[in-house]
Amino acid sequence: MKNTKNLNILIIEDEKDIRESMAKAMEGFFNSIITAQHGDEGVKKFKKFNPDIVITDIAMPIMDGLEMTKIIKELSPQTPIIALSAFSDRDRLLKAIDVGIDKYVLKPIDMEELLSTIENIAKSKINTLNVVDLVNGYKFDQSKKVLIKDGLEISLTKKELSFLMLLINNEGNLVLHNNIKESVWGSESVSDAAVRTFIKRIRGKVGQDTIKNIPGLGYKVEIATKK
């Protein structure tokens, strides 16, 4: 599975034995495997680790997989999500499609089938969108999660990387101030002045024209073309 070695996978499953056995079976195929036990924790782990692919159970306590998928797709529309469920009824399948589920795998899980599904998604959706061309010659490699200019990597802090990926995942659309604070700082309190200082520092690294400010609303990144 050469297409998956650089990928970070997030698994959300409320049954501990299944969650742990899935993670163990996937060892060696991916760069890292992150786990969560319900949708609420899944959203928090997604914001923290920015995984490349999400694998989630549907029926879970606190927040189910479909509700979690809606939130993740609002944060990152391009992130592929694979749903796992013991159910196969038509209404559930249609709802899964409505919220943006990319693939649906029935339980009991066949690990060979699941790994094959992940590899196919990696080929069709991740590798083809791997490098994003920004304006002024900047590029962002979504697999390696690095910013590049003239072949050289530009150092970014964890929060700077999270902010830039949030903008890129929204494909040049406006990202509101509140969404930025929630995604980059989470529950941490941050003032508007601190956010402006933070973004000014990033602009010093990526250029003034790369990140556009929509006064009073938010920011967006200027994307040229995608390879």
Image (tube, rainbow, N blue to C red):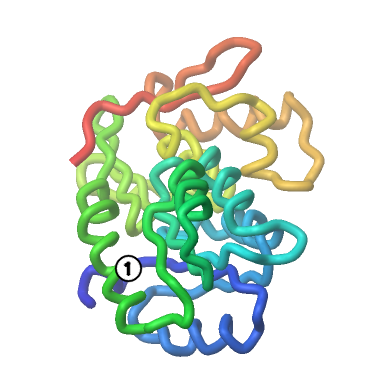
Q: Secondary structure at mark 1?
A: helix
The quadrant of the image that shows the N terminus is bottom left
Front residue (pair 200, 107): 107
Q: Residue furthest right?
A: 189
Residue at position x 77%, y 36% from top?
A: 190
Residue 168 position (above or below residue 93): above
Q: Identify which amino acid the numbered label 1 is placed on.
A: Ile
Front residue (pair 204, 72): 72
In the displayed structure image, the side of residue 4 where residue 159 appears, left or right: right
Residue 167 position (above or below residue 143): above
**Is residue 73 visible to the viewer in this orientation of the structure?**
yes
For disc 1, the marked residue is 118
The spot of residue 165 in percent (x, y) is 46, 43
The quadrant of the image that shows the C terminus is top left
Residue at position x 44%, y 81% from top?
A: 109
Residue 133 position (above or below residue 141): above
Q: Dividing the picture into quarters, in which one does residue 225 lie?
A: top left
The spot of residue 13 in percent (x, y) is 60, 73
**Is residue 76 visible to the viewer in this orientation of the structure?**
no
In the displayed structure image, the side of residue 71 where residue 167 appears, left or right: left
The spot of residue 42 in percent (x, y) is 63, 61
Residue at position x 31%, y 83% from top?
A: 112
Residue at position x 60%, y 10% from top?
A: 215
Residue 209 position (above or below residue 101): above
Other-residue count near label 1 (Cα within 10 Å), few / some / many at <14 / 14–19 / ≥20:
many
The spot of residue 39 in percent (x, y) is 66, 59
